[in-house]
Image (cartoon, rainbow, N blue to C red):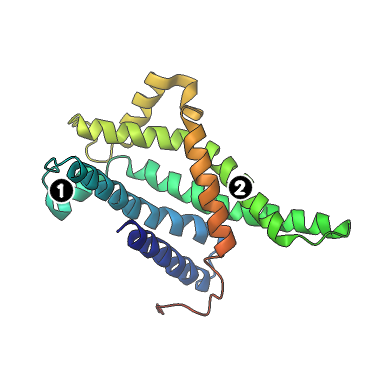
Amino acid sequence: KQNALMLGQYTCTREFKLWMDSLAVPPSISTVVACGLFGVPFSSLQYNLAIQDTYRHFALAPPESPGLLGYLRQKVCPGLFWSFSRAGFATGGGLCLGDLLAESATERLRHVGVEQPMAAKVAAGLIGGSICSLATQSLHNIALVAGRLAVEGCTEQSPHYTTVAMVAAWREMRWSIFYLNFYQRMAIQAVSVCALSMCDIFYRPELRLARFP
């Protein structure tokens, strides 16, 4: 299930990004928007299925399904702005930054007579993913607070909790909002961006599944 969702997420991300590129949208913007747009719902589904599987593993009844609209309200909408920004800039931004770093590193190595484009791409993907992960850690922490507010039944700015979550997160964490718990997330994000860079999911743009007008 998780693999199928991941395949669906990046297939949709590729198709939407390539469609935006065909409209002459700057590649960096199309990458960020596509990663943010499909990162939010698919990640929510992945987390929800993992939670349900955990309940089943311990022979416990999983929480009742609230239906599609209830699911969107309870699982997707809380912190939607922050989740979109986090997914867009962490993954999409990491891919864009990684490409720039890889091009620069490859050119510099070529000047000294070294041809290692693959090694440069791996290193650039890890570095780009790490930088963008740390840069979006505050967005991640605010999104988590928004999810907690939804669980607690907070009604102010329900169901999106955009500014109320930001205020609550700052009140609780202060300056640590920018780095709290970033180690684990940075490791995962760096490897993910590196893998996506190595796979080059936007390769051969002419091979699109869908053709939008």
Residue sitting at the far front: 58
The amino acid type of the residue labelled 1 equals Gly
Q: Quickly name the residue at label 1.
A: 70
Mark 1 and mark 2 lie on one chain; the one further toward the N terminus is 1
Percent position of residue 204, x then y: 56, 76
Percent position of residue 147, x then y: 28, 36
Quadrant location, the N terminus? bottom left
At 51% across and 33% down in the image, what residue appears? 183
Q: Quickly name the residue at label 2.
A: 126
Judge whether residue 163 can be spotted in this image: no
Q: Residues within 10 Å of mark 1 (few under 14, many from 20)?
A: few
Q: Residues within 10 Å of mark 2 (few under 14, many from 20)?
A: many
Percent position of residue 128, x then y: 61, 47
At 55% across and 64% down in the image, what residue appears? 199
Tell me if residue 55 comes above or below residue 43 in the rendering: above
The amino acid type of the residue labelled 2 equals Leu
Labels in figure, total: 2
Using residue 83 as the reference point, say whether residue 195 is left or right of it.
right
At 16% across and 52% down in the image, what residue appears? 69
Secondary structure category for the residue under label 1 = helix
